[in-house]
Image (tube, rainbow, N blue to C red):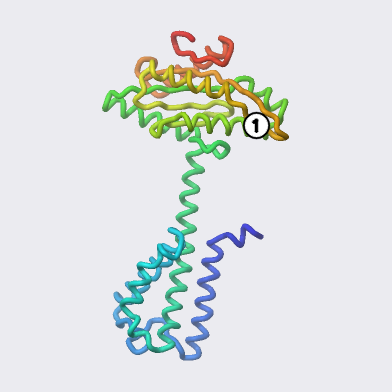
Amino acid sequence: MGKILKDRYIWGIVAILLVFISYTYFQDSGKVSWLPSDETMPITDTVIDQVMFLSIVVLGAYRFHVRGGIIASLPPFLVIVWCHINRLTEIDDWVHLLFVAAVGIAVSFLVGSYADDKKKLKVLATHDDLTGLYNSREFLRLLQVEIERFQRYKSPLSLLMIDVDHFKNINDRYGHQSGDNVLREIATLMQRGARSIDYVARYGGEEFTILLPDIPFSEAMNVAERLRNTIANHATTLKKGQTVNVTVSIGVASFPEDATSSEELVAAADRAMYAAKVAGRNKVCCQSGC
């Protein structure tokens, strides 16, 4: 029930229904007409003026709804007041103004809900719902974009492939909810250490990737080592005050030293990560070793 009450689509439809129900009553009583003339409303009888007036009201209501707060909605409504305050002399004028404003508010609810839903759908399509990081599909798209950028500008590009060590043991011992909490904590640590131009993604399960534009191989190894050390020294708090320390194995690959395509770069970083696992975990490795 609470979700229904918060659904702005429903409130928008309800508002429109109330407007038309009220309008029908006033129309039957002869107090108001839908398209005003100069005798009933301080607007000229041209369609253009009426559309402009309605647009101003809708804009004010939309700004109030989407931008938030009365202050954001004041400019459009002040235009109305400034233009018509001296001409609103009849009660029907004010009634008609309220009708138009109500329609504007209803429309703003619907438009705002559509805009919010469109934004949420875009986030769901490109981000992992558990960690908030980019998902694997968006990561692969961004990787291809960066590969194409390298081909134009020859700027360095490196990739980190990260796997949480012994993650199954965490799930088995503490439960899957605690495992999810560990993944979120690691995602947060990676985001904190990343630059604004880096792309951090959850590649799948307990695997993550970090795409490092403009970072050559030697610097990428240093970035990976700092990240490995940060995670190893971080204690994740679980339920009932329990804490757990986890480590990660990281594989590093660079373009074009280790690959000639996006697929080859992912494969090279994955092989390096596997080498870190074989070498004893909690290590950083590359194509030439650890």
Tell me if 169 is positioned left or right of 73 in this view: right
On the question of residue 42 being in view, the answer is yes
Residue 86, horizontal then vertical, whole percent = 33, 84
Task: Give the camera-side residue of 70 and 147.
Answer: 70
Q: Residue at x 47, y 73 (%)?
A: 102
| Picture layout, residue 185 above or below residue 100 | above
Rendering quarter of residue 249: top right
| Picture layout, residue 254 above or below residue 191 | above
Label count reads 1
Tell me if 135 is positioned left or right of 53 in this view: right
Mark 1 sits on what residue?
Answer: 237
Q: Residue at x 36, y 23 (%)?
A: 215
On the question of residue 140 being in view, the answer is no
Helix or strand or loop: what does disc 1 sit on? strand
Q: Quadrant of the N terminus?
A: bottom right
Q: Residue at x 35, y 18 (%)?
A: 256
Residue 20, horizontal then vertical, whole percent = 50, 77
Residue 236, horizontal then vertical, whole percent = 62, 29
